[in-house]
Amino acid sequence: MSVHWWMSWAYLVLFVTGTFMSQLDRSVSYRGSMYDFHKSIAVLSMALLTWRIFLLLQVWWKKYTKRSPKFTPAWFKTFALHMGLYVFMWTVPITGFLLSNSSRPNNVKFFGIVLPDLFPQNSAMVEVGRSAHFWLSYTFLAFVVLHTSAQWKVVRANWRRLNNFLKSRLKTA
């Protein structure tokens, strides 16, 4: 399975757990464990993102040192959508770190291992982090939906081409 699909599963888990846990009452016994799990998957997604960017830079280097891309409107549209996705894949977890670190130090664990703080504890930044994490998450989700619908169109078009090819082959055989 490619890095793309591992990341898509990680983001699905993050969206589902994030939506669910934000609705939980503070008195729910597993609330803290769910937050720790959510943060662990977010850290994992950042590691996968780093790996994926490294791989993509290698592919781009090999591809575009031989020839420049064709700067068509379709290329710019695809490029903008993917750049948006990568920006959100980076900013959503970073705002989660801001939210977690601002409220309490040593608050982010990777499956039990406490990670160093990226931001200092600052109660004035908690609401900024919460709001940014919320709005960026749902904007990211909108970009994911756009990406999925664009890919769905490609899958359907390829399926149609394959069916037409097979039908024409069967008629001539």
Image: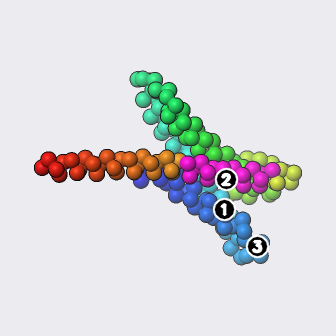
Q: Position of residue 5 (x, y in %)?
A: 47, 53
Q: Residue at x 65, y 58 (%)?
A: 39
Does the magenta run of residues contain 132? yes
Name above or below for residue 71 compared with residue 169: above
Residue ID for mark 1: 18
Q: Earlier in the sequence, mark 1 or mark 3?
A: 1
Task: Name which residue type carries label 3.
Answer: Asp
The residue beneath circle 2 is 137
Q: Secondary structure at mark 1?
A: helix
Side (left or right) of 160 relative to 53: left
Measured Cα–Cα span from mark 2 to mark 1:
9 Å
Q: Earlier in the sequence, mark 3 or mark 2?
A: 3
Whether residues under marks 3 and 2 lie with C-beta atoms below 8 angstroms apart, the answer is no
Residue 117 in sight from this viewpoint? no
Q: Which residue is mark 3?
A: 25
Region of the chain picked out in magenta, as a range: 128-146
Spatial CA distance of label 3 from label 2 is 21 Å
* Residue 112 is inside the magenta segment: no
Q: Residue at x 66, y 62 (%)?
A: 18
Residue type for callout 2: Ser
Q: Disc 3 vs disc 2: which is toward the camera?
A: 2
Q: Residue furthest front?
A: 171
Which residue is painted at 61% across and 63% down in the image?
16
- Classify 20 as above or below 151: below
Q: Position of residue 48 (x, y in %)?
A: 54, 48
Q: Evaluate if marks 2 and 1 touch, with contact meaning CB atoms under 8 Å apart.
A: yes
Q: Give x and y (percent) for residue 1.
A: 41, 53
Q: Quadrant of residue 91?
A: top right
Q: Earlier in the sequence, mark 2 or mark 1?
A: 1
